[in-house]
Each structure stands twice: as C-alpha cells, then as structure tokens.
Image (cartoon, helix red, strand yellow):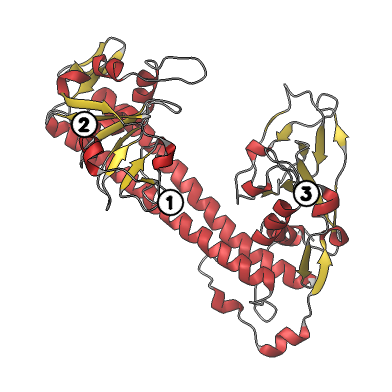
Amino acid sequence: MNEESTLSEFVPEESDKQEQKWEEVQLHEVAYKRSDNVDPQEVELEKHIGLEHIDPNDPVPDWESLDDLSSTKRRFETGDILFAKLRPNLEKSAQPDFEGVASTDIFPIVAESDVNSKWLLYRLSSKPAYDYARRTSAGTRMPRTSWNLFSNFNFLLPPLPEQRKIATVLYTVDQAIEKTEKMIEGTKQIQRGVEQHLFREGYFDHDTIEQTRLVTIPGDWNFDQLSEHTKESAFGPRFGSERYDEDGEIATLRTTDLDDNGHIDLDDMPVADLEYDEVEEHILKPGDFMITRSGTTGIGTVWENHHKPTIPGAFLIRFRFKDSLNPNFMKYYVNSSLGRRRVNRRAKGGVQKNLAGSDLLNMRFPIPTEEEQEKIIEVLDTYQARIQHEKDYKSQLQALKQGLMQDLLSGKVRTTNTNIEVPEEIAQHG
C-alpha cells in the first residue's frame, strides 16, 4: 500500500460482495467506554488531552503536562479512541499512541477484541457518526451527547481482515497528510529565519548594521514614520447587520477572512445590499494595504482583486502608500515575528486589544530602497509559494481521504480481493 494508490485498486468483483457479508451492529456491541475517573495529581501519568488538543479531522492529538491540573479527568490507554462528546459539530476524534488522562468531555472508547480499533477510529470519524452525535446531543450553547445515546450508533461491520485493509488505506493517506504538514511547518520555520536575516541585515551587503530605537537594521536604511510614506488611510465603514444580503453587490472583507499570514479567503466574504455611491470612497483597489485593528491585531494583507466591488470591514485599517513603500514589503514585515511584536506593542485595551490608525501612522518602520524591497519580496514570495503548494496538496489528500472513507466504510468499494499489505501499525490494533 502506498500514497499513489487510487480507488480503482479496491473495486471488487460482484462474487466477492456475496462472499463477505458485513454485519449490522450498534457501537455498544463492539466497543465500550472506559470510565476510570482520576485525580490528575494522584496518578503517575504525564499527559493530558483536552478538547483544544484535538483538531477536527486529525487523528493525532496534541497534549499538555498534568502539572497544574486539579479537576477530575478520565484515564485513557494507548490506542483508545478519544471522541469529543461536547459540541460534536466540531468533529473531533483522535487515537493517541500514549497513555494519559482526558477531559471528561471526551469519551475514551475501547474496541472489543474482534474489532480493529484503527478501523473503528475511522468509522467514528465519519460524517454519519458525527451527525448521529449531533442528533443525540442536548443543550443549546454547549450541546453534549451521552454514551447511553451515542453508543446506539448503528453501522455495518466488515470482517476483521477487511477492517484491517480499510484501515491501512486510510492510514496511508493520513501518513501522507502528516508528512505534508511537516513539510509546511518546516518551510515556515525556514521562512521565519530568513525573515529575521532580511529585516535585520537586508538583502544586499551593507557596510554597517545599526541599532536604532531597539531595532537592528542596515545603516543605510531609513527608519521613518509610516505617515511619511502614506497617501491616505481610513477605517472600514460601519453599517447595520440588516444590510447583509446574499443578493447584494458589495462584498465585505472581514478580519476572519484572513489567516495569520494575511492570505485572503475570498469564498466566504459576505455581501451587503449597499449602493455603490454610499461606499465608493471605501472600495478597495489593487495594492491597498490593510491591517487588523481589533481582535487578533497586527495581521497585514494586500488587496489584489475580486469580481465584486469590495470594502474593508470596520475592524480593518486601509492604507494607500506612496511609491517609496511597497505594500507587499509592509505585509511581510508586519507579519514577521519582528514586525508583529513591534506593532502589537501599540495595541491598547484590556481583553480586547485595539490598534489606532494614528498610532500606526506615527510608528517608525525600516524602509530600504525600492529595489531592495523588491528583492526581499521576491525571496519571501518563493517561500510562500512553496507553502501554498504544500497546502494545496494537503487539501487534495484530505478530499481523497473523505472520498475513500465514504466509499470504503459504506462497503460501496471493497478491499477483500486486493493485495494490501497490513502494516504492524494497523495489525497491533486488532
């Protein structure tokens, strides 16, 4: 079994479907909930898994130390399936390769001896299982399912050899996804190191490196107030929520449409029933620089284009720069660890920090020549392109996995007459 396998390899002959019958079962018939409640300060264990340590559709959980935990937890063993009973709409389940304790909002589920627990993990990570958990949940703000209800989840159970083969196929895709995630994180780490060098020492060779107001930059770079390189700036406009209309003609860019590196997700931007004339001065133009001013502050982005006229949301500040400052250079600088730290020191307030446009305009930034700005952008664009390529590949793998889960777990596509070598990582789970 390898990462290049396709669905066509698992299509059976009709006779095979007749030979290997699947049994209709309920979850409680093939698995049970581990119910060992423990005081984390009285057990000789080191790792705790809460809901925040499980990412949606990711079978590998994170964890934290037990050091400062005091409330009752639920013990789990290596290979137990951890299924989030709280807010099952978040679709969180995982299978740790270590023992520890979990939040009481998580079911530790143990497969019976004639069930492969890796296969059961995928069965419980499927849309039908999450949908059933949602339907059996009670509560409005924080809906929870119960084991008494969720354990009645009904599904088809293949023979153990076929469980192992199905688990092997899906595990192989998961391994490819994990490898891709490591590639993404590795490239990000390299980019962070390159940013440190470029924003401290520059792209070209410089005679001197100086420290100016706690900022280390080449001696021949300018260290100017942003206002010196800004033609105009403005907050995004405010309007009532009743103006949002899926048939509207004006799109709105929100802070939630940006990731931490300033990439814009155009697909989820809401549209509003606004007249062009009333927001004309706010319509974004290619090359406009924006920065988040509330919530997660200090994320910079540069507008490119959209098929609908678009305005920035009220929690974004829009800048138009003079030719002396490339907006993409500014984006990379404020999104770097150096720039983000400096910008966020300007944020004011308690729990909800806010950036003022006037504070940013008065703030000094390192400004190299236009030529050196371009070179720095070219270097960092290369790393971003690599990261985006890997993210696109990860999305393809995730789509492949969803398709495989739907077909393999339902029995639509069978593996019984295929030569799939089951690795020890799968066989050890039953």
Q: Is residue 324 or residue 112 the one in the foreground?
A: 324
Q: Which mark is residue 157?
A: none
Q: Is residue 308 or residue 147 the one in the foreground?
A: 308
Sequence-wise, the earlier of marks 1 and 2 is: 2
Q: Is residue 13 or residue 26 the one in the foreground?
A: 26
**Element at badge 3?**
loop
Residue where numbered disc 2 is placed:
203
For the residues carrying marks 2 and 3, which lies nearer the camera in this image? Answer: 3
- Residue located at (38% from left, 29% from top): 315
Q: Amino acid at mark 2?
A: Tyr
166 left or right of 252?
right
Residue where numbered disc 1 is placed:
391
Q: Amino acid at mark 3?
A: Asp
Q: Amino acid at mark 1?
A: Lys
227 left or right of 348?
left
Q: Position of residue 379 (x, y in %)?
A: 26, 40
Residue 105 falls in which quadrant of the image? top right
Residues under numbered marks 3 and 1 in contact, where contact means CB atoms less than 8 Å apart: no
Sequence-wise, the earlier of marks 3 and 1 is: 3
Instruction: Give the Cα separation between the discs numbered 3 and 1.
Output: 30 Å
Q: Residues within 10 Å of mark 2 (few under 14, many from 20)?
A: some
- Residue located at (61% from left, 81% from top): 11
Residue where numbered disc 3 is placed:
80
Q: Position of residue 144 (x, y in %)?
A: 74, 43
